[in-house]
Each structure stands twice: as structure tokens, then as C-alpha cells.
Image (cartoon, rainbow, N blue to C red):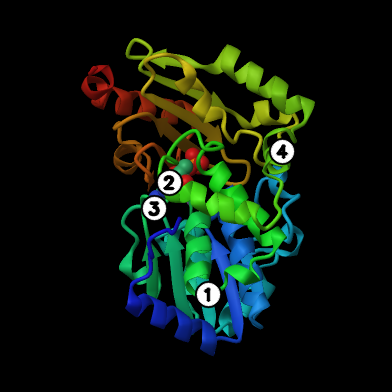
Amino acid sequence: MDIPQILTPTQLIQLMQLVKSARRCVVCAHRGPDGDAVGSSLGMAEYLRKIGKQVNIIFPTAFPDFLRWMPGAADTIIFEERESEARQLIKEADLIVCLDFGQLSRMAEMGAVVAAAKAKRICIDHHLDPDPAVADVIVSLPQACSTCELVFRVIDELGGYERISRSAAACLYTGMMTDTGAFAYNSSRSEVYVIIARLLAKGIDKDRIYRHVYYNYSEHRLRFVGYVMNEKLQFYCGHRASLFTITREEMKRFNYLRGDAEGLVNMPLQVKGMKLSVSLREDTEKDVVRVSLRSVDDFPCNEMAARFFNGGGHLNASGGELPFPLSEAVKTVEAAIAAYEDRLKAK
Ligand code: 5GP
Ligand code: MN
């Protein structure tokens, strides 16, 4: 079974030319990189290395602990930890590949450094409405399950399928899996499974990848999940919406590791009739509150995130940030839920 081409003939030529003429490449993704950001970066970087490019992967901030096992993850550079080296690499690059984001601001401080660099830029992303200024060539397909799906398709259309190794296939599979909650949502297009079949043909063990990602936590994390669901979860609008908060003190108490809160915000949606789940988490480095939103059906998280939380994202999964204390942030969430009460209560 073939999958339709995503690149237009012009894009294909542009990409081929950009890749061909590049020697030093930087591959980067958004701040707080998740499985899709890390997986697509590792997969793309390996492909570029295979065709003779010198490649560095630079993430604005660190990735979660549960992704450390990914082949090549240890060789990535975290901008905020090795800033001068990262700045130099970005400055010297002649091609920058931007993955899993559509606005340079999603890289925080690193965005301005990338914007100022002389390199040509390629963006491959599945978020809605990429900024036309994000790159010279933008491959955008919001219906894709993940950026990893798109990276696979781009490499394939550039004629590189044979060059995808087992490790790169494992990385691309990981992002497809994590961005769909292990194929529980946003994954009903048949292409997704054609691609998975082609990744499996590379010899990956998908069951093992699942365990590496989802069965790889500490005891503390499991107890933390229990604590949050039992003691912190509040319901609104007759169990149509919910909110929980996580403070720095609680993270300390449960020996929080980066990534330990991942997936928690999906859990309240297990309650029958729930349409919207919101979480608020005190940032460990800056004095801001990180907001995560998840919804089902047509409830627009991204619209709510843009209106109330300085953020955005996908229809059913969005995020944002509030620059004030948790108690104030709770009031903002309650105001947002009140503003959407009619839609939340509608059948
Ligand atoms: P998470 O809740 O996992 O942090 O984010 C879920 C999704 O929301 C991400 O995949 C991303 O699409 C989007 N998102 C998260 N934070 C932001 C943000 O600050 N700005 C925008 N525009 N989107 C965000
Ligand atoms: Mn993604």
C-alpha cells in the first residue's frame, strides 16, 4: 500500500537543493522537548549524517528522563546548559532543521539565535498555522499524527528509506507513539499504520519501545500519580471539566524527575462525559506556571490556550504559560472554564 506524497514538486526540489548544498547542519526542536520532538530530531539527524553531513542536535531545554534510552539522545546539546557552544554551532551552520514547532518563539531564547543565523531553514511540523517566517521551506501537515510521521515521509520522498537504520526507526516510532498516547488518539489515518509497518520492517521491537517509555518510572512517580488524582483533582461543570495543580514543594516531596508529570493531564478524561482536563504546574526554573490542556471531540483547547494562557497547540492538546503565582493561575483557569461553560455542558 502506497502513501500519498506530502511534498509538492517545488518543495521536493527545494529540500534536495538545501540538503545537497549544506555541510554543517543543526537539528532543533521546541523547548521542553517531548518524545516527538526528540524522536524526530534523532531520526532526521541520523539520516543527514548518513548522507555525509556534519550534524548537531540542539534542544533549548532538557528532555524528560524517560527518553534517555533513545539511541543518540546522550549526544544532544541542551542550549541552556552549553549556551556558548550552542550559539557558535548555530552561527556556523548552513542548514537548520526546525522540528515539531511552527514559531521560533517556541524555542524561547534560542529562537532569536536561530533567527539571526545565516543558515537556511527547513521546518517540518504538524501544529496548526506555522509562522511563514519560521523557515525558508515549511512542510506542514496538521493532520499528521506527529512530526515523526512527517520526518519519515520526507526522508522517504527524498529517496532515503534505505538509509533509515533500526535505531532511527526506533526514534521515529517513539514519537509517533508518544504523540498519539500509544495510538489512542489522533491516529485513525491508515497511512500511520503503513508507516509503522515500514518501521517494523527495520527490525524495531515496538513492545520494548512501549516499555521503555511507559514502564520506566520510579516508585515515587507512581505514588505521585496516585496522590495527584486522589488529593488534587477538582471537577467543574458537573464533571465536564477538571483541574489539578502541582507545586514545587510536591515535586520535591515525590522526588520529581523531569517528565514525571507527562501524561497525567490525560487521566481525568477517563471519567465518563469529561470534555476538558487542565493542569497547572509550577515551573522548576522560572517563576511561571506551565499550563496543559487536553480535550475530547471538538472542544478547542488551542483556542482556550490562546485566549487565556498565552499558548496554543492542537485542537485536543495544548499548552501555555502564566506569569503569576499558582493561586492566581487557578483563578484564570476557573474564568476560562466559566467562559466555555455552555460548550462544556452541551451534549
Ligand atoms: P503539553 O501539555 O504536553 O506541554 O503541550 C501539549 C501541546 O500543546 C504541545 O504539543 C504543543 O503543541 C502545545 N503547546 C504547549 N505549550 C505551548 C506554548 O507555550 N505555546 C504554544 N503555542 N503551544 C504550546
Ligand atoms: Mn509533536
As helix, strand or loop, the secondary structure at mark 1 comes to loop
Pinpoint residue 230: horizontal percent, then vertical percent: 59, 12
The kind of residue tagged 3 is His
Mark 2 Cα shell of 10 Å, populated few (<14), some (14-19), many (≥20): few
Residue 71 seen? yes
Q: Nearer the viewer, mark 4 or mark 3?
A: 3
Establish whether ligand 2 lies closer than 8 Å to the Cβ of label 1.
Answer: no
Q: In this view, does 189 lie above or below 139?
A: above
Name the quadrant of the N terminus.
Answer: bottom left
The kind of residue tagged 2 is Ser
Residue at the spot of label 2: 190
The residues tagged by marks 4 and 2 sit, at their Cα atoms, a distance apart of 36 Å
The residues tagged by marks 4 and 1 sit, at their Cα atoms, a distance apart of 40 Å
Task: Name which quarter of the figure residue 219 lies in.
Answer: top right
Residue 159, numbered label: 1
Find the residue positioned furthest to the bottom: 21
The residues tagged by marks 2 and 1 sit, at their Cα atoms, a distance apart of 21 Å
Residue at the spot of label 3: 127
Q: Earlier in the sequence, mark 4 or mark 2?
A: 2
Say which residue appears at 51% left-offset and 62% top-offset.
151
Q: Which of marks 2 and 1 is nearer the N terminus?
A: 1
Q: Which of marks 4 and 3 is nearer the N terminus?
A: 3
Task: Name which quarter of the figure residue 75 lies in.
Answer: bottom right
